[in-house]
Amino acid sequence: MDLSDEYMKANPNVTIKTEDVPFNDYMKKLQTMFAADIGPDVLWNSIWRQPRFAQADSIIPLDELAKNDASLPKYAPTALEMGKTNGKLFGLPAAASTWVLHYNSDLFKEAGLKNPAELKAAGDWTWQRLLEAALTIGKREGDRLVTQGFMTDRQAYSWMSFAYNNNGVFVADDRRSFTVDTQPCIDALQFLADFIQKHKVSSTLTDQQGGDYVPRFGTGRLAMMVTWAGTAGDVRSVVQDKFQFDIIEIPPAKAGGRVGGYWHANLLNVNSKAKSREHAWGLTKLVAGAKAEIMRVNTGQLNTPLVDDPELIQAYKTKSPVKNSQVVFDLLKTPITLPYNENWEEQRFKVIEPYMAEVYDGGKSIAQSIGAINKQINDLSPK
Amino acid sequence: MRRHVIGWTATHVLMIALAIIMVFPFVTMLLTSTMTLAQAYSFPPDLIPKPFTIAPYFQALQLRPFHIYLLNSLLVAFVITVGRLFTCSLGAFAFARLQFPGRDAIFWVYLSTLMLPEQVTLIPLFFIVKNFGWIDKYQGLTIPFIVTAFGVFLLRQFFLTIPRELEDAAIIDGCGPFGLYWRIILPLAVPGLAALGVLTFVNAYNMFVWPLIVTNSDSMRTIVVGIGLLTADNTNLTNWPRMMAISSIAVIPSLLIFVFGQRYFVQGITLSGLKG
């Protein structure tokens, strides 16, 4: 890696070895290495696993190192909060992602509708307009959904985003107290479920085969979907010039309502047993910094820039295949509270998403079950 | 006669259908390796490459040193196979032919270790290998797998089918236990050894979790781990044509082993089901 060479040149007594690991097996390898006390000095970590590493004292707080360090990357104001666990900074954020709505502009044009960007410019980008567009563009031939108006997916991020934009509080600022049984959250879930169950303009979760965002959107027969902003690059490499598409924030429930950004970052941690904390910190700043982010953007990884660097922002806007790349910067200013406590994975995969799947499949009535689900989620929160 | 023809036809139709189902993934893998990225992601899926291209092979080979990964896999599989054949045949001979106190009880206890899932032994084994200084070395990749209860069990079953009378003459001539093993039992056990060899080679070649955990550097990686690294080489989108290209190359040794050793492979499965 070029940056490693640069660091070693500036620090001749330091040798840096980098290792890449298959994404799906990264945690297995990392946890085995930490168990055997041979963990890397600097490591990538996921935002919801950092609390466990912090709890086990496997990583060090960076507050003292970051304090008064002029060479710390110039983060957007809300970005550093991402790296905190229980109020202490444990990770420098990098390679962030933002949850946005992707839409097929050509389908809107074919249907004679204003696209979301035009609706937003007119102050009219709301849930109602999203629904109307989905109903107009979505087309069935008998039992077959030929054109999808909107794809309701199985991920908790979607529910959380829609709930926030409906003035709901999915989880409190303590990241442990969930209130998914409040009316705004219920309405958000029902709104998403209705695309599948009532309006029938979304594929079912079974048809989606675990979330085939890119292939489905790439067919040109899916008008709108919600997923990471960086997926736009993947879509462009698949569809080439087959059709025009863009991204926009998920709409507020009502005109003038609040719009939140669900975004999270990967984190760079320092091993508590690092041979040299000073150099581990130096390398951490380098990998999280603007130069490294520019390198990642230029290779096609359209991570949301968290560092306020004009060259990085320009590189992102140039590389992004959509017109409205500005949306990721706007959403950085209004972050949704993230639920990343020590038990979030269990809450998400054992309760929230299976529950969403049952609702979307028509197997559960929200009104009759949401209270119990909220209790289950809260029971799993760390005390 | 008519019933015979109907039965013959029905059997063959069923076998052909099953063969198509079995071969279909391999054919899809080959066809995908010659597609463009856009076509690989088309929905509904396209089976025929349009246009046909072998660019994914060159692109994938340039991304990582797959030739090194492949050589490592072959070397590791070979060493484990030879080691296992030797150690397991010794153990099997002892359990099948020698008399010592607690022989059967020890055998069943040893066999019970097969019930331990890999996840349970992964970290303790990693600790042991780390303490020997074998992390990121060939020893770490091979030595933990040179012995296996399954191999001992398989060969024991085979050895039990060899008539004792064949050893009697050697014993009368003064042949000791090792001589019996080396000169009488081993030559007669070639089919059993071949069966174990084929199974071992294929399993060792396809190992993923352990090589992932125990290796850190590119020079020590195996081909299966290398394929895993292709899942997201620089974006979140898996480049299926490249991945299928490397997989098509990686599968060749296993396929050759199956083609030439399938008789022994089937024999191995049969042997493991024989009563002791």
Image (tube, rainbow, N blue to C red):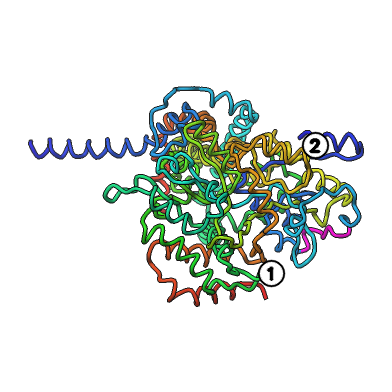
Q: Is residue A90 visible?
A: yes
Which of the 4 image quadrants contains residue A360? bottom left
On whether disc 2 and disc 1 are found on a single subunit, the reply is yes
Percent position of residue B229, x then y: 61, 39
Q: Is residue A1 left or right of residue A261?
A: right
Please name the residue shown 48% across and 46% down the image.
A114
Amino acid at the residue labelled 1: Asp
Q: Nearer the viewer, residue A148 or A210?
A: A148
Q: Spot the residue most to the front.
A: A122
Which secondary structure lies at badge 2?
helix
Of tags 2 and 1, the one toward the viewer is: 1
Alpha-carbon neighbours of circle 2 within 10 Å: few (<14), some, or many (≥20)? some
Q: Which residue is mark 2?
A: A3
Which secondary structure lies at badge 1?
loop
Circle 2 chain:
A
Q: Main secondary structure of the magenta part?
A: loop
Please name the residue shown 65% across and 45% down the image.
A326
Alpha-carbon neighbours of circle 1 within 10 Å: few (<14), some, or many (≥20)? few
Please name the residue shown 65% across and 71% down the image.
A172
Circle 1 chain:
A
Q: Which mark is residue A173?
A: 1
Compared to B161, does A259 lie above or below? below
Q: Nearer the viewer, residue B251 or B194?
A: B251
Magenta extent = A57-64
Amino acid at the residue labelled 2: Leu
Percent position of residue A284, x then y: 81, 48
Q: Nearer the viewer, residue B217 or B276?
A: B217
Q: Is residue B210 left or right of residue A365?
A: right
Please name the residue shown 75% across and 60% down the image.
A81
